[in-house]
C-alpha cells in the first residue's frame, strides 16, 4: 500500500456520520491520527460546509491541534451547530512557512452532520419485511449506521447483512422495505437538521432477547448497546416495533406490559437518559393463523402497548390496524410509508414539542345503557366514523358470555354506540379491534387515523 504523507485521520467520525446534538443544539467531534512530513510542523483542522467549502462558523475555521513527538495528533471541534452536511479538512503547516492551499496533503471526512440519531429495534416489521416495489428514494441528510458498522446514505433494505460485524441480528432471508427512511426524511425536512438511524432489529425476536431482566440471554439488548457505542454513543430515541413473537403463549402475552417496562428501564439506564423517548407501534394483523387462543393474546399485547404509552412518560404508541400487508404478517411498502409518517408526527409532537395532532383516538369511557354500550374516545379532531358501515370491530362480554353486537352507530362526534342483541347482565367488558385479524375499526375520519385497539375495558 502506498505510504501516505501529511495529516492522516485515524480516529473520529467517518464519512456520512451523524453526530447527536446536545440540548443546546450543538455537536462535538473528536479526531486524531498521524502526521508525516519532512521537518517540524503544526497540524490544523477545520469544518466547512460540504456544498461551499466555507467555514461553518468562525470558531470552526483553521485551528491548531495537539501533536506528540511520536508523530500522532489529536483535537476536538466543539460548538458545531446542528445541521450539515459538513466536511472535515486537515493540513500540516510547516514551521516558518506560510499556511495556505499548498500545505502538505491532508485527510478529509465527508458528508458529516449534527442532528438526531434514532435506534431501530424490534422484530421483522422493524427490520423491514415489506415486499414489492415502491418509490422511497434516498435523501442526503438521512444516514444509516449499517450492520457493517459503517455510516452510509440510508437506503433499503436497512437490515442488509453485507459485511456484518454482528451476526446476532442477521436475517435468515433478505429483508425489504421498512418505515424508517420515510420517518427520517420527514423529520429532517421539518426540523432542518440531519437524522441518523442505527439498525439493530431482528425478525422473529421475542421481547426476552431485548430485556436483561428476564432469564436467558438478552443478546439483542447487548448488541443494541454495542451499535450505539460504535455509532457515537449518544442517541435521541428508540423506534420499537415488536410483539408478534410474544403472542405465542398466554404467559408472554399477559406479562408483556410489565416486561416491556423492564426492558425500557434497562435501555434508559444503559444509555444514561432516564427520559429517553421510545416510539412504539401497536400490532397490526396476522392472517390465517389457526390457534384458538390467538385472538385474545393478540388483543392483550395491543392493550399492553396502549397502557404503557398511557402510563410511562416519554413513550408514544401509533396504530397500525389499517395498514396493508404484503404477506400474512408483514406491513407492505405502502403501509410502511404511512407508518413512517405516523411515527414522525409522534416524534414531532411528543419529543420536539411541535403543535401537531399526532395521537390516535383512544377509548376513555364505556357506559352501558338499555340494550347498548356508549364508547367515548379522546384525541378525536373531527369525528369517529368508518369506511365500512357493516364492520363490527368490537366484542362485548358479560357474566353470561359474549353479547352480540347487532349494530354500530356513529353519532358524528367523539362517540361510538354499540347496539346489543340483549341486555348486559352483571359485570361486563368491551374489546375494540379484537383478535388477530379484526374487522375494520373506526377512525378519526378527517385524519384517517384509526383508533388504538383495546382489550378488557370495563363497562360502567
Image (cartoon, rainbow, N blue to C red):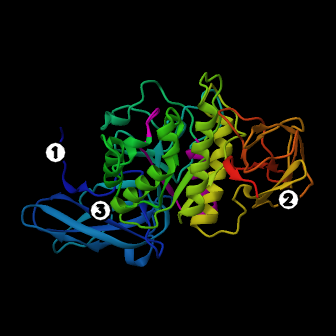
Residue located beneath label 2 in the image: 382
Q: Residue at x 86, y 56 (%)?
A: 383
Give the total of numbered labels.
Answer: 3
Give the image location of residue 164, x and y in percent. Answer: 33, 35
Q: Residue at x 48, y 72 (%)?
A: 25
Residue located beneath label 1 in the image: 3
Residue located beneath label 3 in the image: 90
Q: Residue at x 79, y 47 (%)?
A: 425
What range of the chain is rendered magenta?
Answer: 179-206
Spatial distance from mark 2 to mark 1, Cα to Cα? 67 Å
The residue lying toward the viewer, choosing from 293 and 382, is 293
Element carrying mark 3: strand
User: Would you place residue 174 above or below residue 116 in this image?
Assistant: above
User: Would you place residue 66 above or below residue 380 in this image?
Assistant: below
| Quadrant in which residue 270 is drawn | bottom left
Residue 187 sits inside the magenta stretch: yes
Horizontally, is 95 left or right of 206 in the view? Answer: left
* Badge nearest the viewer, 2 or 1: 2
The residue lying toward the viewer, choosing from 417 and 165, is 417
Q: Quadrant of the N terminus?
A: top left
Point out the tag, 2 or 1, that comes first from the N-terminus. Answer: 1
Horizontally, is 178 left or right of 272 in the view? Answer: right
How busy is the neighbourhood of tag 1: few (under 14 within 10 Å), some, or many (20 plus)?
few
Point out the tag, 1 or 3, that comes first from the N-terminus. Answer: 1
Element carrying mark 1: loop
Element carrying mark 2: loop
Give the image location of residue 289, x and y in percent. Answer: 61, 24
Point out the tag, 3 or 2, that comes first from the N-terminus. Answer: 3
Give the image location of residue 114, x and y in percent. Answer: 45, 63
Q: Is residue 61 visible?
A: no
Residue 165 sits inside the magenta stretch: no
How busy is the neighbourhood of tag 2: few (under 14 within 10 Å), some, or many (20 plus)?
some
Amino acid at each position: 500500500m502506498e505510504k501516505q504523507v501529511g495529516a492522516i485521520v485515524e480516529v473520529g467520525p467517518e464519512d456520512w456520520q451523524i453526530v447527536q446534538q446536545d440540548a443546546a443544539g450543538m455537536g462535538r467531534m473528536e479526531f486524531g491520527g498521524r502526521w508525516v512530513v519532512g521537518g517540524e510542523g503544526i497540524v490544523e483542522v477545520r469544518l466547512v460546509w460540504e456544498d461551499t467549502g466555507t467555514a461553518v462558523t468562525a470558531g470552526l475555521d483553521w485551528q491548531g491541534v495537539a501533536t506528540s513527538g511520536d508523530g500522532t495528533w489529536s483535537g476536538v471541534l466543539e460548538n458545531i451547530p446542528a445541521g450539515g452536511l459538513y466536511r472535515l479538512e486537515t493540513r500540516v503547516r510547516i514551521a516558518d512557512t506560510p499556511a495556505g492551499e499548498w500545505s502538505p496533503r491532508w485527510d478529509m471526512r465527508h458528508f458529516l452532520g449534527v442532528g438526531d440519531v434514532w435506534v431501530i429495534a424490534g422484530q421483522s416489521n422493524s427490520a423491514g419485511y415489506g415486499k414489492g416495489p415502491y418509490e422511497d428514494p434516498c435523501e442526503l441528510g438521512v444516514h444509516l449506521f449499517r450492520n457493517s458498522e459503517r455510516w452510509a446514505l440510508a437506503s433499503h433494505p436497512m437490515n442488509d447483512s453485507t459485511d456484518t460485524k454482528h451476526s446476532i441480528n442477521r436475517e435468515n432471508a433478505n429483508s425489504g422495505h421498512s418505515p424508517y427512511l420515510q420517518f427520517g426524511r420527514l423529520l429532517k425536512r421539518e426540523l432542518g437538521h440531519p437524522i441518523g438511524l442505527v439498525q439493530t432489529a431482528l425478525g422473529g425476536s421475542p421481547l426476552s432477547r431485548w430485556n436483561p431482566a428476564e432469564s436467558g440471554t438478552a443478546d439483542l439488548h447487548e448488541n443494541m448497546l454495542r451499535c450505539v457505542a460504535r455509532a457515537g454513543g449518544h442517541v435521541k430515541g428508540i423506534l420499537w416495533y415488536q410483539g408478534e413473537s410474544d403472542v405465542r403463549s398466554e404467559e408472554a402475552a399477559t406479562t408483556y406490559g410489565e416486561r416491556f417496562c423492564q426492558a425500557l428501564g434497562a435501555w434508559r439506564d444503559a444509555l444514561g437518559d432516564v427520559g429517553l423517548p421510545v416510539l412504539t407501534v401497536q400490532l397490526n394483523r396476522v392472517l390465517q393463523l389457526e390457534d384458538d387462543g390467538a385472538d385474545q393474546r393478540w388483543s392483550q399485547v395491543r392493550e399492553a402497548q396502549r397502557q404503557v404509552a398511557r402510563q410511562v412518560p416519554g413513550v408514544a404508541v401509533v396504530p397500525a390496524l389499517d395498514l396493508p400487508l404484503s404477506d400474512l404478517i408483514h406491513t407492505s411498502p405502502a403501509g410502511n410509508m404511512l407508518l413512517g409518517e405516523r411515527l414522525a408526527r409522534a416524534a414531532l409532537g411528543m419529543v420536539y414539542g411541535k403543535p401537531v395532532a399526532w395521537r390516535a383516538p383512544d377509548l376513555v369511557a364505556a357506559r352501558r345503557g338499555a340494550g347498548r354500550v356508549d364508547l367515548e374516545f379522546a384525541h378525536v379532531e373531527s369525528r369517529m366514523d368508518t369506511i365500512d358501515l357493516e364492520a363490527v370491530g368490537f366484542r362485548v362480554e358479560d357474566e353470561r358470555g359474549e353479547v352480540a353486537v347487532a349494530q354500530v352507530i356513529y353519532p358524528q362526534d367523539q362517540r361510538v354506540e354499540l347496539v346489543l342483541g340483549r341486555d348486559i347482565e352483571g359485570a361486563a367488558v368491551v374489546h375494540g379491534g379484537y383478535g388477530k385479524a379484526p374487522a375494520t375499526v373506526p377512525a378519526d375520519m378527517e385524519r384517517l387515523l384509526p383508533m388504538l385497539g383495546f382489550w378488557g375495558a370495563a363497562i360502567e
